[in-house]
Amino acid sequence: MDVLPTHKSKSLIIDCDPGIDDAVALLLAMASPQLDILGITTVAGNVSIETTSTNARSICELGQRTALKIFPGCPRPMVRKPIIAAHVHGENGLGGIRFPKPQMPLQQKHGVDFLRDSLLQSTTPITLATLGPLTNIATAIVQAPQMVQTLERIVMMGGAAGAGNVSGAAEFNFYADPHAAQVVLQTAAEYEIPVTVIPLDVTHRAIATPPRRQALRDLHNPIADTIATMLDNYGLREQRDMGLSGPPLHDPCVIAYLLQPELFVTESVPATIEVASPLTQGRLVIDYDGELDLPGRIDLATGINAEGFYGLLTEALKSFG
C-alpha cells in the first residue's frame, strides 16, 4: 500500500548543511510530490559552506532534480567561532563517497537574500524546513523580521530534552550557532509563527538498523543503494557510545513530519536557547512548569513511529526506480 498521502502540495524552502542525513532528507523531499521545493539554501555546519553547497548540488543531480535552485548562505555562525562535524560525516560530508563534480550551477544570489526576498514577496504561505544551524534564517530575520509573517510553519531538527551530542547539554545544530537559534525562536514567538522542533530524543529512535538498510538495497535502484552505503559508516561513534543498532536519521525526520505528522507525538511547551553560559551554551531550555515566563511556545516532538518512518522513506525512494 502506498504510504504517501495525497493532498495539495506544500510550498517549501529547505535550509541545510549536507551532511549524510541531510542528503537523505533532501532525497526524501525530492521523491515526494506533495512538496513543492521553492529553493534550497546551504549553510556551514556539518562541513564548510563550500562543501555543503557542492554536496547539495551533487544530491540534486543524484535525484535528477537539476532544475532546483541552490543558494549558498553563511560561511560561519553569527557570533561564536565555527565548528564542523567532519569527524561524523567524513571530510567531504557524504561519508567519503565520491560523486562526480556537480554540473548544475549555484545561484549567484546569497541564501540569506533568497530567504528574505522569497518570504517578503510571497502571496501564499511557505513552510521552512531547517536541517542545520539556523544562521541563514536568523540573519535574514535581523534584516527583515516581518518576513516571518508569510511562514506557515518552521520545522527544525535541533536540540535535546535530554543529553546533547556535542556537549552534555547541547545538540550540534543549536550548539553550532546558539544565537541564531535564539533569534529564530524569539521572532517566531513574537509573530506567533508555529514552530516544530524535532530533538535528538526523538531522532535517536529513528535507527537505520541493518534490516532497514537492506530494505533500501532491496529496492534495486542506485539512489537507495547510495543511501544505504552512506549509512554503513555513518555515526559509528554515536552507535558505539549509545549502544545503537545502526545510525539515527536525524534530518529526514523533518521531511517525514511534513509528509506524515501523524508519525510523531508532539507537546506544546515554552522554550528558548541558552546563549550565555559556557557550560550549557546551545541548550534547548524547556520551561515545563512555566516558571521562566517565556514569551512563546514550540511544538516539541516527543515520540516517533519508527517503523512508519522507515516505511515512508522506503516507499518514497521507490519513485527513483
Image: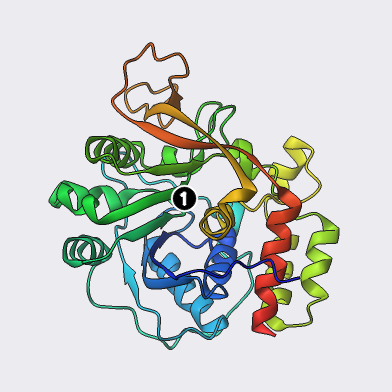
x, y percent for residue 205: 70, 43
Which of the 4 image quarters holds residue 79? top left
Which of the 4 image quarters holds residue 116? bottom left
Is 173 situated above or below 310? above
Is 73 situated left or right of 9 in this image? Answer: left
Mark 1 lies on a secondary structure that is loop
Is 127 situated left or right of 32 in this image? Answer: left
Tell me the quarter of the image containing the N terminus: bottom right
x, y percent for residue 256: 58, 57
Question: Which is more toward the observer, 315 or 286?
Answer: 315
Q: Amino acid type of disc 1?
A: Ile
Is 193 situated above or below 92? above
Is 288 situated left or right of 311 in this image? Answer: left
Which of the 4 image quarters holds residue 74? bottom left
Q: Identify the residue at the far front of this view.
A: 7
Q: Identify the residue at the far bottom of this view.
A: 103
Residue displayed at 64% across by 49% down: 263
x, y percent for residue 123: 21, 66
> Quick check: can you spot residue 270?
yes
Residue displayed at 50% across by 36% down: 300
Is 195 situated above or below 233? above
Is 151 situated left or right of 211 in this image? Answer: left
Residue displayed at 41% across by 35% down: 298
Scheme of colours in the image: rainbow
Number of marks: 1
> Quick check: can you spot residue 136?
no
Residue on which disc 1 sits: 84
Tell me the quarter of the image containing the C terminus: bottom right
